[in-house]
Amino acid sequence: MVAPATLSLRPCATLAPSRAAHAHAGFAHTSRPALSVSCPPTRFETLRRAATAVSDRQGSAEPSEKQEDKPRTYYFLVANAKFMLDDEEHFQEQLQEKLRLYEERSKEQDFWLVIEPKFLDRFPNVAKRLKRPAVALVSTDRNWIRFMKLRLDRVLAEQFDAETVEEALASNPAELKFDKPDKWTAPYPKYESGWWEAFLPPKSSNGTA
């Protein structure tokens, strides 16, 4: 006695009638596309996909959070105060023009003058080459600092990282006093002493405040 055939179906299986079934039924065999049965995802599968999507979003957000915590790089030019603030005739004009441009574009200021900056303690090889008091032009704009290096020429350039702008712009107490020249030959008046105060950091960033 021949055992009866059994039909086993698995979820989401692809069912296609066999040639034998067609022949037994008296039909000529023709090529037909297979019948594909698609099953909706189970509840477990739906929850698993949702959990994976949330995990991916959290993973992609972590780098941006870490990026915010990274120290910022500051670039600076430094020289003695007499050269930077009294002898260099076009320095004030260049800073004023840049500040005016920022105001027109509603751009946040990213450059400052720092008198006797504390960060010079990180650069003993630079500090020993300076007459004191020293003044630094500090900015987060590397390209602009490179441009100003070419314009000012007789300055030293370096860079450093700081966690906060207050740390980057902290300064030591210093008194600036420049003697007026006996003879001024330029066709324009000499800049008034104290013009640089408009470019100093806020008092909260100054180590003397």
Image: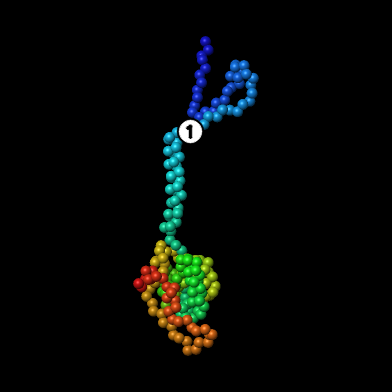
Query: Where is residue 183 shown, x and y percent of the image?
Result: 50, 89
Classify 56 as above or below 157.
above
Quarter of the view holding residue 209: bottom left
Classify 71 as above or below 93.
above
* Amino acid tagged 1: Pro
Residue nearer the viewer, 117 or 100: 100
Q: Residues within 10 Å of mark 1 (few under 14, many from 20)?
A: few
Q: Is residue 11 visible?
A: yes
Query: Where is residue 194 shown, x and y percent of the image?
Result: 43, 79
Report the residue at 44% width, 69% height from top: 123
Marks counted in the figure total 1
Residue nearer the viewer, 145 or 39: 39
Report the residue at 51% width, 21% height from top: 7
Residue pointed to by mark 1 = 40
Classify 127 as above or below 69.
below
Secondary structure category for the residue under label 1: loop
Report the residue at 43% width, 51% height from top: 62
Q: Residue furthest left?
A: 209
